[in-house]
């Protein structure tokens, strides 16, 4: 075939192809409204079949070749409660991508949008969307789920979001309402405008617990898949109160300026990399589970690098966090398969110690506010757990120091442990008893006047390495993590005697995250800087802890149970007192109705006695002669539930007399 013939055939083919495309465009133009109604009806049927709700569009038509007009769009729950209503929407579709089957929206205009979500004990209009369909639980599906490529899935999700963003968006009069029992939240947006990558909107929120008015400004680069936005109050010197959280979670989160940026999105060698930065100025958070007071930060900032692979996700070690003047280097690695595991590495490089304390969030460490120090401090923490082998959990924590010295103790006056001080005992947040810890209190007992049996029995039960650790028993903490993970709840604690002492003397009884963090820091300050000796710490501990209803300190306890001095306690009595410390008000339930210790108590006696033999506190002979039985001779005897045999006998005699008669 000659070149001329080939050229003619090629030209004919192109003409035919052009005619086909033209016919396709013409056919689409003639039938486009029919196709549109068919597509909407199909979507409505699928929505109803999947969720049992209704998707309704009152009017739909094409305007020109590529503009779609929709009027009165609504989504309703199965109970006919409206979830979404849009008065009108217009979208312009890019024609060329449409010819090859790709829908790309170029411009969007939406007017009068109302979203109302409510939930009560009787009914709601949102849960029907949240009910996932049942999946087959066969081996094939499980295997397929375990082979999900997390990185690719995340990349496709991000890619899709950026791809569908129109070049121009204008949304007028938007209202979003959330209602639940007595709490409500309403957010109104007059205009949301997006034009060639730049967007802005003003948001006004009204809630059951306050209101806020703030602005959002940002920029999106679709080709580079990057974005940035900032939130700030409309009026200067006012804070933005983040909506919804206060009304529905009782969490107040406020800030002067919030800035978030995604500077890089890259997918290479099956790994999705996300680089960016986020910062918050004049931030504050308040929740009763965190702290009774506001926790405030002048500046919080993170430069992050996330790497998401086929079966793992990692916050890279190159990421940096800044809290005021403190620099933190976090690294987190989560592996999804073949076995789930989590590794955390958290470092604060050595820095001037005064800057360290001044950079801590205000309100988080109330007892050391105003502390003055010199030297340098750092912090290192490593954690690893494999969910298939939780007993092999790894945990290490340290605070390296260099020429560190405390010049002034601040609010808590940590050195008060070395002198007589007033102690107040609390129950359920209420003060129940105050007394002096020192010689002026007749019930105070110096350590050398307390039975060695009691000292070592309680130490063995509560914290066997008290005299040798620096306030933290990492081995006990690791066991606590493993046990709590296996049981799926808080079943075992890892507190040392040092931590219990600090909790009782310096901190409130509120069980908050802030208290636990502050507790750890104060323990480190006292132990690592020898503010108080181990002997003095144990002496104070034994003289303030609860031993029974209204009974505090070993002086009161020895008299309350045995009507004797603390120095006179026997081995059996000492082990008993050690046993009841975790639940002192329950002491009476360790006795049967004859006043003898119940059989289960023997196990505790045996365990403690074995430990005391290994530590050479008692001899093997003493252990063998130990009988788990005691005689309560003090005031506690009145609370032990002893069966009234006199009353039982009289009843039996009465019954016998009735029979005889």
Image: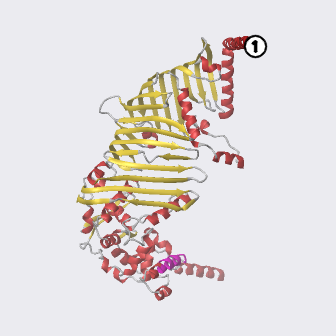
In percent of the image, x 63 and y 20: which residue is there?
98
Q: Residue furthest left?
A: 407
Residue 565 visible within the image: no
Count the marks: 1
Picture layout, residue 657 above or below residue 300: below
How dense is the environment of label 1, judged by Cα within 10 Å: few (below 14), some, or many (20 and up)? few
Quadrant location, the C terminus? bottom right
In the foreground, 40 or 657: 40
Picture layout, residue 328 above or below residue 161: below
In percent of the image, x 56 and y 41: which residue is there?
269
Give how far across and how far down residue 432 sits, in percent: 34, 62
Helix, strand or loop: magenta stretch: helix
Give how far across and how far down residue 463 sits, in percent: 42, 70
Can you identify the residue that label 1 sits on?
2
Circle 1 — which element?
loop
- Give the residues in magenta: 599-610
In percent of the image, x 36 and y 56: which residue is there?
379
Residue 499 lies left or right of residue 439; in this view the side is right
Residue 606 lies left or right of residue 214; in this view the side is right
In the foreground, 291 or 236: 236
């Amino acid at each position: 075939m000659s070149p001329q013939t080939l050229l003619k055939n090629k030209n004919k083919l192109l003409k035919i192809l052009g005619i086909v495309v033209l016919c396709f465009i013409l056919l689409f133009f003639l039938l486009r409204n029919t196709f549109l109604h068919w597509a909407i009806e199909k979507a409505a049927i699928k929505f109803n079949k999947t969720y049992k709700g209704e998707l309704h569009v009152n009017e739909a038509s094409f305007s020109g070749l590529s503009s779609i007009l929709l009027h009165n769009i609504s989504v309703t729950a199965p109970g006919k409660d409206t979830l979404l209503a849009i008065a009108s929407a217009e979208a312009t579709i890019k024609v060329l991508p449409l010819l090859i089957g790709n829908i790309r929206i170029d411009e969007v205009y939406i007017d009068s949008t109302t979203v109302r979500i409510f939930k009560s004990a009787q009914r709601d209009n949102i849960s029907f969307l949240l009910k996932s369909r049942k999946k087959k639980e066969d081996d094939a599906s499980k295997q397929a789920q375990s082979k999900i490529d997390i990185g690719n899935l995340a990349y496709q999700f991000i890619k899709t979001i950026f791809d569908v963003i129109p070049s121009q968006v204008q949304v007028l009069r938007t209202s979003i309402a959330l209602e639940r029992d007595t709490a409500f939240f309403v957010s109104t947006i007059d205009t949301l405008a997006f034009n060639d990558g730049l967007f802005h909107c003003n948001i006004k929120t009204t809630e059951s617990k306050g209101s806020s008015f703030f602005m959002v400004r940002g920029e999106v680069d679709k080709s580079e898949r990057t974005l940035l936005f900032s939130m700030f109050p409309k009026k200067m010197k006012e804070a933005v109160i983040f909506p919804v959280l206060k009304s529905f979670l009782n969490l107040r989160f406020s800030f002067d300026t919030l800035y978030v940026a995604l500077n890089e999105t890259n997918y290479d060698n099956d790994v999705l990399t996300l680089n960016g930065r986020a910062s918050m100025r004049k931030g504050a958070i308040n929740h009763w589970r965190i702290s009774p007071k506001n926790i405030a930060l002048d500046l919080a900032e993170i430069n992050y690098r996330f790497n998401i692979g086929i079966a793992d996700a990692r916050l890279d070690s190159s990421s940096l966090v800044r809290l005021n003047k403190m620099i933190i280097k976090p690294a987190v690695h989560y592996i999804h398969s073949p076995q789930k595991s989590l590794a955390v590495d958290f470092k604060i490089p050595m820095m001037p110690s005064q800057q360290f304390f001044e950079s801590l969030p205000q309100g988080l460490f109330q007892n050391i506010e105003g502390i003055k120090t010199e030297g340098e401090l750092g912090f290192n923490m490593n954690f690893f757990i494999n969910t298939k082998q939780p007993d092999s959990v790894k945990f290490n924590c340290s605070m390296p120091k260099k020429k560190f010295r405390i010049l002034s103790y601040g609010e808590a006056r940590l050195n008060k442990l070395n002198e007589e001080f007033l102690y107040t005992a609390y129950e359920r947040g209420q003060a129940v008893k105050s007394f002096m810890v020192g010689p002026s209190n007749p019930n105070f007992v110096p350590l050398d006047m307390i039975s060695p049996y009691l000292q070592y029995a309680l130490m063995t039960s509560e914290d066997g390495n008290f005299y040798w650790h620096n306030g933290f028993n990492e081995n006990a903490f690791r066991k606590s993590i493993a046990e709590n993970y296996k049981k799926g709840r808080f079943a075992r604690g890892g507190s040392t005697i040092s931590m219990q002492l600090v909790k009782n003397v310096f901190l409130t009884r509120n069980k908050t995250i802030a208290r636990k963090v502050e507790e750890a820091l104060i323990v480190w300050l006292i132990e690592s800087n020898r503010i108080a000796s181990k002997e003095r710490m144990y002496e104070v501990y034994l003289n303030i802890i609860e031993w029974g209803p209204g009974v505090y300190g070993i002086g009161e306890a020895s008299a309350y149970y045995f009507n004797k001095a603390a120095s006179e306690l026997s081995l059996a009595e000492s082990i008993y007192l050690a046993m009841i410390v975790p639940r002192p008000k329950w002491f009476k339930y360790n006795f049967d109705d004859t006043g003898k210790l119940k059989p289960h108590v023997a196990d505790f006696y045996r365990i403690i006695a074995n430990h005391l033999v290994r530590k050479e506190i008692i001899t093997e002979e003493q252990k063998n002669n130990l009988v788990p039985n005691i005689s309560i001779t003090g005031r506690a005897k009145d609370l032990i539930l002893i069966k009234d045999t006199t009353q039982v006998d009289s009843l039996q005699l009465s019954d016998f007399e009735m029979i005889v008669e």
